[in-house]
Amino acid sequence: MSLEEHFDATIERDQRIEPRDWMPDGYRKTMIRQVAQHAHSEIIGMQPEGDWITRAPSLRRKAILLAKVQDEAGHGLYLYSAAETLGADRTDLTERLIEGRQKYSSIFNYPTLTFADVGVIGWLVDGAAICNQVPLCRSSYGPYARAMIRICKEESFHQRQGYELLMTMMRGTQAQRDMVQDATNRWWWPSLMMFGPPDSQSTNTAQSMAWKIKRHTNDELRQRFVDMSVPQAEKLGVTLPDPDLKWNAERGHYDFGEIDWEHFKEVVSGNGPCNKIRLERRRKAHEDGQWVRDAATAYAAKHKEAAA
Ligand code: FAQ
């Protein structure tokens, strides 16, 4: 059996591809692209909520938010390690991000205007992330699939903290309820865009499905998310900002309105409301951390010398 036949048979049997296994160049390239984009999203994704750590309304909320943002840092580092098993170099990936040569999720380019945004990010953004990532626990690349299992457990805590925060605000004053509704209005459509372009315009889906990197298409997961969110919104007492949202008994799913894909393209190409702030902060943090990397390298070199 040739190396390629062995790879195809492994995929066919639903077994995992491991770092030392032979894999087609295209598979390796796609995996690095997706894992790196995912890692960058986790790291950049610390910023919108991080803005509220110093302004959280109570010690309890502050402790929860700190824990969540730290989890996101952990997910990012974990995913960069998964990318390294494919031969990628973390410094190189970070530089590609900072120079705008590699993408991160569109969702993190919006501002967090009130504390209700923290709750809505947990409810909708982490909700969408879970919807997208649970099937990735069965992704064909072993280190990525295993990383997803742990990450999904933590994301589910994130989602619940957001929903609980919103429930609490909805039991509060009218002003608090208005904040929740306003945040829901602003985050709903961008959350639907997290799943990527429609299947008809998704350049990678067909090949990624054939390699079992992706288990569902973008539109399938988006529909699942809409179906899941509508009853949650009803329970919460908020309206989702889509007049076309209605149950379709024939399809057994909710129909929903047109997504503004032109806006999505603008955000992905660097022109969203906060793209420049996000990348600038990431660049500064990377530069400010240079002395730590230098110290670690010098320490490793000293030990190597002593051991020789
Ligand atoms: N934003 O052909 P497809 C989180 C790009 S969750 C920006 O459909 P694919 C947790 C795509 O890369 C967020 N770019 O691509 C958290 C491709 O570009 P390229 C991260 C997008 O890969 C919560 C092009 O468009 N989650 O961080 C987006 O088959 C709260 C064509 O698209 C993941 O990354 C987008 N939304 O499907 C953290 C999950 N969508 O490179 C903090 C893993 C698409 O060809 C707080 N990734 N693009 O030029 C995936 O499941 C997939 O990569 C998709 C895209 C579904 C995102």
Image (tube, rainbow, N blue to C red):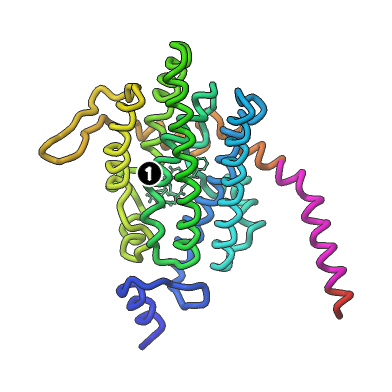
Numbered disc 1: secondary structure: loop
Residue marked by disc 1? 195
Q: Residue at x 63, y 62 (%)?
A: 89
From the viewer's side, name the closer residue of 195 and 231: 231
From the viewer's side, name the closer residue of 179 and 47: 179
Vertical arrangement, residue 195 with respect to residue 92, above or below: above
The image position of residue 105, as x and y in percent, is 48, 43
Residue extending furthest toward the top: 174
Q: Quadrant of the N terminus?
A: bottom left
Q: Residue at x 45, y 51 (%)?
A: 152
Q: Residue at x 34, y 76 (%)?
A: 8
Q: Quadrant of the C terminus?
A: bottom right
**Magenta extent:** 285-303
Magenta part mainly helix, strand or loop? helix
Vertical arrangement, residue 171 with respect to residue 162, above or below: above
Vertical arrangement, residue 266 with respect to residue 175, above or below: below
Report the amino acid beneath label 1.
Answer: Phe
The image position of residue 50, as x and y in percent, is 61, 34
From the viewer's side, name the closer residue of 209 and 207: 209
Tell whether 190 sits left or right of 65: left
From the viewer's side, name the closer residue of 161 and 264: 161
Residue 3 within the magenta-colored segment of the rendering: no
Residue 85: name its quadrant: bottom right
Residue 239: name its quadrant: top left
The image position of residue 266, as x and y in percent, is 45, 34
Crowd tier of the residue under label 1, counting other residues whose Cα lies within 10 Å: few below 14, some 14–19, many 20 or above: many
Residue 293 within the magenta-colored segment of the rendering: yes
Q: Is mark 1 within 8 Å of ligand 1?
A: yes
The image position of residue 189, as x and y in percent, is 37, 31
